[in-house]
Image: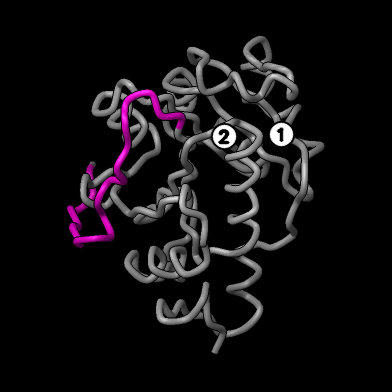
């Protein structure tokens, strides 16, 4: 069942793009956004030779607890305060379409913007549980996947259920720049700089709230 539609000008708009652009899609709750997210974006731009990275700030992850979820507008604005790269765009557009699952989002983008070369970016920690996502095999068939190393998950991810099922579609890390031009299914595992920051740990560290007028998040 679709969510109630939420449209906020400047928050739920789809970023501008041109045919042929190589775009990384980095989805998450970003509750709060932090330097680890920023680092992955910069690494993806470089390692995958992308024209842009879009942060897709979800209205709510079906696999996560909603009780501590800050309002969508606050999370989008906090992310924009944190990110200072002209090729990284932040949007909460999923809310304007009522999408619940990643599969719905990616399918919409493929249909609406067929001439763009999309790559789905996810952390190794998410890839470990990827087989629990709704229509995960279809997601892998919609667009290439770039899996970025995460502390504590790097050893598990290459042997996860999804990794085993998709093993024959994995490309070598040295060939990562060709991934956006490849037909799905295709995926790459990217090693590199890692951050131990976790949105969950930040929320637990003190009483937490996102203040869009501050940089990133505020602990009060």
Q: Earlier in the sequence, mark 1 or mark 2?
A: 2
The numbered disc on residue 27 is none
The numbered disc on residue 190 is 1
Q: In this picture, which residue range is highlighted in magenta?
A: 2-22
Assign a secondary structure to mark 2.
helix
Q: Which residue is mark 2?
A: 130
- Colour option used: one colour
Q: Residues within 10 Å of mark 2 (few under 14, many from 20)?
A: many
Q: Is residue 31 left or right of residue 102?
A: right
* Type of secondary structure dominating the magenta stretch: loop
**Quadrant holding the C terminus:** bottom right
Q: CA distance from mark 1 to mark 2?
A: 16 Å
Q: Is residue 211 left or right of residue 218?
A: left
* Direction top: furthest residue: 168
What's the residue at 43%, 67% (across, down)? 69
User: In x, y percent, where is residue 86?
Assistant: 46, 53
**Quadrant holding the N terminus:** top left
């Amino acid at each position: 069942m679709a969510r109630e539609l939420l449209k906020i000008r400047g928050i739920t708009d789809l970023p501008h793009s041109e045919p042929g652009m190589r775009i990384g899609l980095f989805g998450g709750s970003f509750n709060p956004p932090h330097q680890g997210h920023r680092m992955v974006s910069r690494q993806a731009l470089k390692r995958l030779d992308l024209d842009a990275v879009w942060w897709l700030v979800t209205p709510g992850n079906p696999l996560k607890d909603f009780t501590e979820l800050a309002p969508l507008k606050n999370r989008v604005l906090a992310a924009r305060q944190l990110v200072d790269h002209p090729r990284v765009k932040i949007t909460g557009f999923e809310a304007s379409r009522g999408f619940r699952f990643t599969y719905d989002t990616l399918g919409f983008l493929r249909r609406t913007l067929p001439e763009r070369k999309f790559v789905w970016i996810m952390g190794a920690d998410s890839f470990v549980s990827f087989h629990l996502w709704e229509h995960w095999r279809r997601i892998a068939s919609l667009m290439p996947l770039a899996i970025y190393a995460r502390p504590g998950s790097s050893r598990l991810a290459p042997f996860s259920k999804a990794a085993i099922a998709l093993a024959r579609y994995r490309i070598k890390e040295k060939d990562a720049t060709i991934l956006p031009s490849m037909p799905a299914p295709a995926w790459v595992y990217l090693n590199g700089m890692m951050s131990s920051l976790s949105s969950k740990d930040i929320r637990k560290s003190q009483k937490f709230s996102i203040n869009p007028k501050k940089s990133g998040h505020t602990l009060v």
